[in-house]
Amino acid sequence: MQFSDIKAQRPARDQLAADYSQLFSLLDSGASAQAMQRWDVRRRETDTWLSLTHLHFSQDTAHPQYKADREYADQIGPVVTEFETRMKRRLLAAADGQNRGPLPSHLRALWHMDISTFDPAIAIDLEAEAGLEARYTQLIASAEISFNGQAYNLAGIQPFLQHVNRPTRHGAALAMWKFFQAHADELDDVFDRLVKLRTKMARVLGDDVFTPLGYRRMHRLDYGPSQVENYRNEVLKHVTPLVTRLMDHRRRENHLDELYAWDEPIIDPAGNPTPAGDQVFLTEQAHGMFEQIDPSLADLYRQMLAGGFMDLGNRPTKAGGGFCTSFPNVGMPFIFANFNGTHHDIDVFTHEMGHAFQNYQSRNQPFMDYFWPTMDAAEIHSMSLEFLAYPQMSRLMGPSAERYRRMHLKAALEFLPFGVCVDHFQHEIYNHPDMSPQDRHRTWHRLESLYMPWRKWGDLAYPASGARWQAQQHIYRSPFYYIDYTLAQCAALQFWRLSNADYPSAARQYVDLCSRGGSAPFIALLASAGLKSPFDSGALADIVREAGEYLQIGSS
Ligand SMILES: [Zn+2]
């Protein structure tokens, strides 16, 4: 299977209307099994086209055709959602009266959430929302950061932000934030429009504010804002003190009077270790690594490599970040990244392969809705693979393997306070939609001081004023997504503990969890893998204790 052979027809409005009218006729005539089957084919085709379109645009945000297709996808997306919602409503109406129908209760619960997030009256707002999100993406992708006489994009500047030379790091950070400051008005304006638009949609759908709609969009079936608030408090109680000690340790290790924001990325005092080779080297070495973790993972990797299902290099006009997408009409995933020669290449590689493996393992689940779990659970597969790769790390990092492991573990812990801060910020923003841009910056500033009390911005005036959040694309593009990474990190750190005790059993549990895909909600999936819910007090305390011992920073 070659990536270049994948084709999917651009869904024309007329064709969609004709196809769905046939599906509704089948339902009218009582042929619901046949309707389900044909609908599945229609959905796979549409989803594959949407995935291809978003991927192509990310591969080259300046390509006129890709841009035009992306704009068309933004327009047609709400039309597709409207048809799918009608179909789900019809199937649910028929199924809800029956105790044991063809639709399992989890699928029904997912669809009930879906139908509650859409109404034709908001179709035009959804299109506008997608347009604003794309504006943010393009603005960020177009960044030209002048540094040392060269122009870099945001991925390209990253190696300098963690350079072992302090003035280089500081200079790179100044240059990067200068770009954000230069676009401050646009960044505030795009976000203001997004908040108002999302609030307006929530009100059309019967909520006062966007938060409940945001939760339903994320398909949160077995927890709500109060459990999330508890979890944030647990992070504040257990993790913030540990990370504060880590930062103080870092300051002393690096012989610094003050640890400024641009010093924080130097997790290893000898300079963060870099991969033992370039992209070609890493993709070659990964064969052996994946083979040792699980043979089925290695098998998928070989297929992806041979079929061109990866785009890992950094290029001008390529969108930033890393992600995994998939093409359900052929059952293959694709991973996208921006390798830049830092340890992030390894993090992103193992992370996105975790997503790809889960999606592939779940490709024969009985419903398309189960191919991916909800994002909180989906990030468990990706983040856990980062930890399960630890014993194989010398293949990619050479003699720096142990330094990588320590650095990665510290980064995983340091991420938690930041992650919950992003989440808390979004709750404040959407629960108070009339805040001014200045209020939003003040809010970030207040929360940053709470969750990350060590943070010192020095002369980086823009983030010091409370603007750090504008560099976090999820805040613009995926509201309320960010907590999912922290919840999943809590599960991934449990896999780290399990794999320390009994690697083969941890790997088996991991593969089984991947195969279950999205066939259950978050807490149920955790329980099925023998993992503790992050919402139970104690889950974080155990992790923090073991990590503190491993890193020898258990207490000050
Ligand atoms: Zn991910």
Image (cartoon, rainbow, N blue to C red):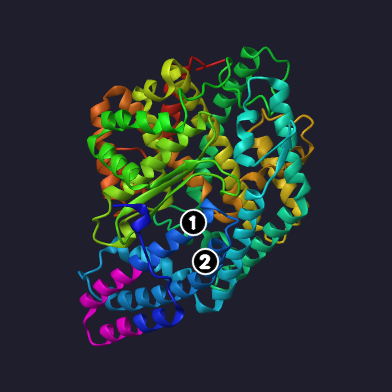
- Is residue 127 depicted above or below 480 in this figure? below
- The residue that disc 1 covers is 56
Q: Which residue is mark 2?
A: 69
Disc 1, SS: helix
226 drawn magenta? no
Question: Residue 507: which quarter of the image?
Answer: top left
Of residues 529 and 378, the one drawn nearer to the viewer in this rendering: 378
Left or right: 516 as drawn, with respect to 286: left
Left or right of residue 551: residue 491: left
Q: Give, as a three-letter code, the residue at label 1.
A: His
What residue range appears in magenta?
Answer: 21-43
For the residue with label 2, is its CB less than 8 Å from the closest atom of ligand 1?
no
Residue 534 visible in the snapshot: no
Query: Where does the image place residue 216, in percent across and percent down from the top left?
Result: 47, 61
Q: Are marks 1 and 2 in contact (CB under 8 Å)?
A: yes
Task: For label 2, count other residues whose C-alpha is less than 10 Å away and answer few (under 14), some (14-19) or many (20+).
Answer: some
- Point out the image quarter for the C terminus: top right
Res. 181 in view = yes
- Image coordinates for residue 246, horizontal then vertical, percent: 57, 21
Q: Relative to 352, is 208 above or below? A: below
In the picture, measured across the screen, residue 79 lies left or right of residue 261, that is left
